[in-house]
Image: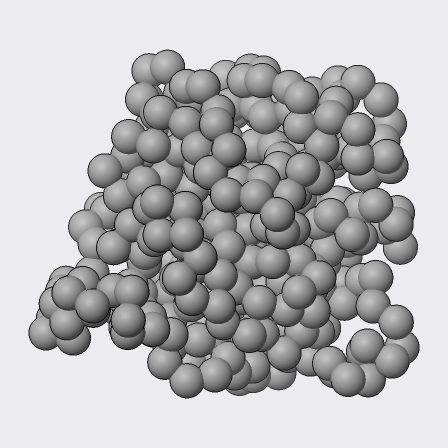
Amino acid sequence: MASTLERRLCGFSERPGYAQAASANSKDDLHREHHVTIPAAIGEARIWRDGRAILGESLWWKDDALHWCDITAGRLHRGPGSGATDGSNDTVLSFDPPLASFQPRASGGYVIALGSRVVVCDADGGAEREIARVAHTHGGIRFNEGKCDPAGEFQLGSMNITTGEPDAAVYRVTSAGARLVRGGFGTANGFEWSVDETTAYLTDTATETIYRAPWTAEAGFGELVPFISGRMHDGLTIDRDGYLWSGIYGDGVVVRISPEGEVVETVEIPAPNVTSVAFGGDDLSTLFVATARENLTEEQLEAHPQSGGVFAVDTRTAGLPVRTFAG
């Protein structure tokens, strides 16, 4: 069982960088022309995997499969798009928890953030090798969300799971180790980059704020400034039209945010603790949403029995292919 604060804050082509985005079609042109008045989401969220994860996180799509993890259980899931809702066709790998986040490697396999170390391994979990270890400032800090940047490096946040004090940090991980980027975070969470790769977005769930900053591969993050505040933003993704999608932990929704920082659409999810979002499917037009069961009462679980599952929402837009780790 995670601490109360952790449950609140975290619970609900093979070169590095983006590959070619999905092709546009006539409905996409219509969407671009009327991006405010026509909702991007089509219909309601549906259960895609009824996984009942304690803390589902780190969604991404690659090679016709959705990947995600259960942080608390230390399980890495690979679910084929044609697999069964109960997960019986999925591949599940086990690691020492917490399995905070993971991303694909350009050479195959994964880069994985565990409590205080980062490892790489083959696609079947074999040949595990540690590439970085961080001495957190105290025992109440662990790694959290991570995502590969346009340079193919693993941007990795940490979080204070005990008090929420701003003594967590962001690290830049390569095959040569981890380098501190900056501190002062309570819960460094969702990462994303603009379509033109000149702007970075970073969430601090503890301050209920998404920040943005100028971005270059050489310098990394520029000065962080608040982009949107006021709700418990968790995981982030971006669509090809430049709109962010943010999961709101505790509210059971995903919001779509314009490049100007305005919420233009809200999608309801039948689970309160929304944790991670990513586009996938054949044309990357399906929005996948991970959720968590932790910190829910028996009454809440009875009302939302599929909490901890992965949900899917059809959209009129599409995402971008996942970036890969160069190490």
Q: Residue at x 57, y 67 (%)?
A: 253
Image quadrant holding the N terminus, namely bottom right
Exactly how many numbered labels are in the figure? Answer: 0
Residue 139, percent across and down?
86, 27
The quadrant in which residue 283 appears is: bottom left
Q: Is residue 314 left or right of residue 129?
A: left
User: In x, y percent, where is residue 238?
Assistant: 37, 52
Side of 325 relative to 210 (left or right): left
The answer to whether residue 221 is visible is yes
Way the structure is coloured: one colour
Quadrant (top left/top right/bottom left/bottom right) for the C terminus: top left
Image quarter of residue 323: top left
Q: Toward the viewer: 59 or 201?
A: 201
> Residue drawn 50% across and 80% down?
45
Picture layout, residue 111 above or below residue 58: above
240 displayed left or right of 310: left
Q: Quadrant of residue 101?
A: top right
Q: Position of residue 324 (x, y in %)?
A: 38, 41
The reply to whether residue 87 is visible in this rendering is no
Q: Nearer the viewer, residue 131 or 122?
A: 131
Residue 218: percent from the left, percent from the top? 33, 15
Which residue is at a point 31% across and 22% down the rendered structure image? 216
Residue at image location 66% in from the left, 58% down from the top = 249
Residue in the foreground of this view, choosing between 182 and 53:
182
